[in-house]
Amino acid sequence: MNRDDVGNTNECFVLNTMQDETSDSSKYIIINKVFQLNNKEPNSVQNYDVGPDNSTMKLINEAIIEEYELTINKLCYKFKNQLIRSIKNDEFELGEISSSSIIFSDMMRQNENVAKRAINEVFLDCFHDDNVVYGVLEIISDIEYDVIYPNGQTIALAVSAYSDDRIKEALVRAFENWCNVESLRILNTIKFTSSWLESYRLDVIKDIEEFCDCAI
């Protein structure tokens, strides 16, 4: 079961059970489940009236949503810190898949939305660290365009103002790897003062135009 399904599954369990004619034991199980989700002890559960009224269902749903959000936040925090540690200790070699990219791909398989949120937070928290920013660009460039959209593309565009030519090169390389019409449009809006970077950008544009059999 994916983590994305946790909230829906628990909510479905509660609502379906609540809609039935529940026995006293079923009521106890429902409330005990809600208290477990919130890491609390149902001290007075025997006196807790669980009927199918809106106020009780709202209370239960709120408890489930609160726990679900807490779980997601914890997972994002874990992903973010793991990525930062990996990037800082990684060696990014051209033409090779880095260990950080492998780790991020595994995170995407676990929970795509949380993984993309985590990579965003890595960038925002470490925007002043050129080495981490470079690592983030290398990671997102290894993910397919549609999968990392729009997080990856937003990050790539944001670094166009950086002074580090290595980061700008990684930016162009990301769009080169994605190699589609959308990448072509974006690259046509960027210009560099460095002659070799500008030459690289123009070469990539030409290659993408030939690959896509179009010119914009």
Image (cartoon, rainbow, N blue to C red):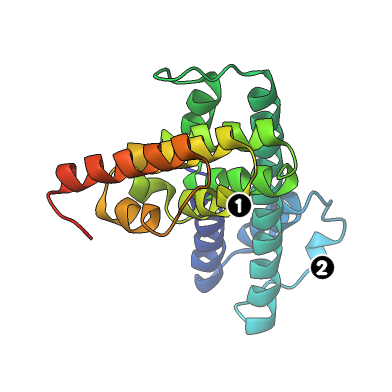
**In front here: 208 or 135?**
208
Residue at 45 percent across and 34 percent down: it is 196
Which residue was labeled with disc 1? 161
In the rendered view, would you say 54 is above or below 211?
Answer: below
Residue at 76 percent across and 54 percent down: it is 38
For label 1, the crowd category at 10 Å Cα-Cα, with few meaning under 14, some 14 to 19 and many 20 or more, is few
Question: Mark number for residue 47?
Answer: 2
Q: Which of marks 1 and 2 is nearer the N terminus?
A: 2
**In front here: 34 or 82?**
82
Query: What is the x, y in percent for residue 141?
Result: 43, 37
Task: Name the quadrant containing residue 178.
Answer: top left
For label 2, the crowd category at 10 Å Cα-Cα, with few meaning under 14, some 14 to 19 and many 20 or more, is few
Residue 214 seen in the current view: yes
* Amino acid found under the numbered disc labelled 1: Ala
Number of callouts? 2
Query: Dot 2: what SS?
Result: helix
Left or right, 28 with respect to 47, comes to left
Query: What is the x, y in percent for residue 144?
Result: 35, 41
The outermost residue toward the bottom is 54
- What separation in Å lies between label 1 and label 2 (alpha carbons)? 62 Å
Quadrant of the image for the C terminus? bottom left
